[in-house]
Image (cartoon, helix red, strand yellow):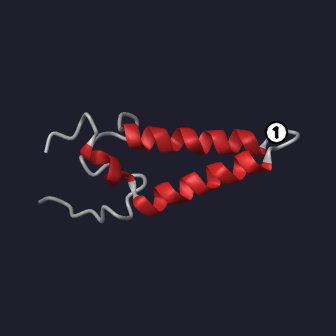
Amino acid sequence: MVRQLNKKKIVGICPVGIKKAVCPSIKKTRQMHTQLMIAQRQKNPDSSQIESLRNALRKRKSLGIAVECGTCIYNKQ
């Protein structure tokens, strides 16, 4: 039984079924999230950098990671 996935809303699940630690799209999203956390914890935070990272994460969430699956090296479909 194959589970149906809503590809527009996927952020934390790879539609191809690759582990989270291996999926390049999830890895990129996690790196952006980590950069945002680091930027927010600085003593003199750069508000423009924080806002750009937030907007980029929002954009990734609305598009979903399935957008990048066509170019993913693990996608053999």
User: Which residue sits at x=21%, y=41%?
Assistant: 75
User: Which residue sits at x=60%, y=56%?
Assistant: 55
Q: Which residue is mark 1?
A: 42
State the residue in front, 9 or 49: 49
User: Which residue sits at x=63%, y=49%?
Assistant: 53
Q: Amino acid at mark 1?
A: Gln
35 vs 63, left or right, is right
Residue that lies at the very extreme toward the right in this rendered image: 43
**Circle 1 residues within 10 Å: few <14, some 14–19, many ≥20:** few
Residue 54 vertical placement versus 25 (above, below): below
Task: Identify the element where label 1 is drawn.
Answer: loop
Query: Which quarter of the image is occupied by the C terminus?
Result: top left
Q: Residue 72 appears at what percent x and percent y?
A: 28, 39
Q: Quadrant of residue 32?
A: top right
69 vs 46, left or right, is left
Q: Residue 58 appears at what percent x and percent y?
A: 55, 59
How many tags in the picture?
A: 1
Q: Residue 17 appears at what percent x and percent y?
A: 25, 46
